[in-house]
Amino acid sequence: MFKSLCIVSLALFLVGCAAEPKDAPGAVRLRFSVLGSKQEADLGGSLVRKLEKAHPGIKVSVEPIAGMGYDTKLVMQSAASTLPDVVWLCDTLVPTFIEYRIVKDLREFIEADPSFDLSDIYPKMLKTGMSADGGIYMLPRDLGTVVMFYNRTLFRRAGLLDPKPDWTYDEFLRMAKKLTVRDRDGRVLQYGFMADYTWWATNVPWIAPAGGNIISADGKRSTLSSPESLRGLHDLIDLVTVHGVALPPNRPITIPGVDPFAAGKVAMCPQVCPQIPSFRATPKQFDW
């Protein structure tokens, strides 16, 4: 079901050499940029602490970059020769960063380290960070497979058991209907489902089961308009327009800035594993 989603990954890039040591003789200082959220900064800090414990001669400063346009800021830093040594970046921008020589080929470092085993990485994931000539410019941090997060507390309140691993669309729709709660005037107080309708990754799980895909096998043309892809997209759209069980886009159900799933106002939502730290930090009043 999720075979088309292997490229939704997060990655690390080695983009330069260490700055001149300013600590003890022989010490190495590195800069590591991450996304600006507290969760990403905490994760970066955790990785750094493990690295520094294993290698006392290396010191790493974590530099969260807040706000929108993270990749644009990295390009500007590169032009100004202030780019950190290691940066987080989504894999979809790897070709651009390779073309403009912002990132450095890691293969020489990998080959010089006998403890590093490339076979530990899924081949398709490794390929997302490689150039056509075999250079390795990205090492994936995690596999961003889309899965369904669900609020077990709301499920039990509706008299529902946990979804089975092989649940069908019809079973999902039945659950979404039971999990959608309205007041006496028909106003929705709680939705059974929500999704980011503008993000291709959360659309593919609806397109693929219908036999469609977002791009042709040779990667040269879009197949979103194929009958199969459109049938899958209609299954997703119908949750809003026909069945009324999904939160419509641009219709708030919580105060601005509060995630509806985290607020307990939506029972199910498809997301990727990097969302987990954010969910862990907010939904404390229910089981999920």
Image (cartoon, helix red, strand yellow):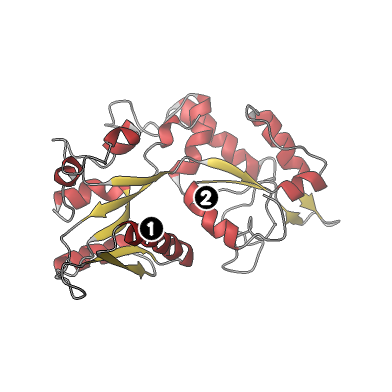
Residue nearest the viewer, comparing 19 with 238: 19
Q: Position of residue 163 (x, y in %)?
A: 69, 35
Residue nearest the viewer, comparing 158 with 21: 21
Which of the numbered marks, if any, corresponds to residue 50? 1
Q: Residue at x 29, y 66 (%)?
A: 60
Looking at the image, can residue 180 be seen? no
| Amino acid found under the numbered disc labelled 1 | Lys
- Image: 96 above or below 259: above
- Residue receiving disc 2: 196
Residue nearest the viewer, comparing 97 with 180: 97
Q: Residue at x 40, y 67 (%)?
A: 36
Please tell me how crowded label 1 is: few (under 14), some (14-19), or many (20+) other residues with Cα within 10 Å.
few
Q: Residue at x 36, y 39 (%)?
A: 7
- Mark-to-mark CA distance, 2 and 1: 34 Å
Please tell me how crowded label 2 is: few (under 14), some (14-19), or many (20+) other residues with Cα within 10 Å.
some
Taking the image as shown, residue 15 lies to the left or right of residue 183, namely left
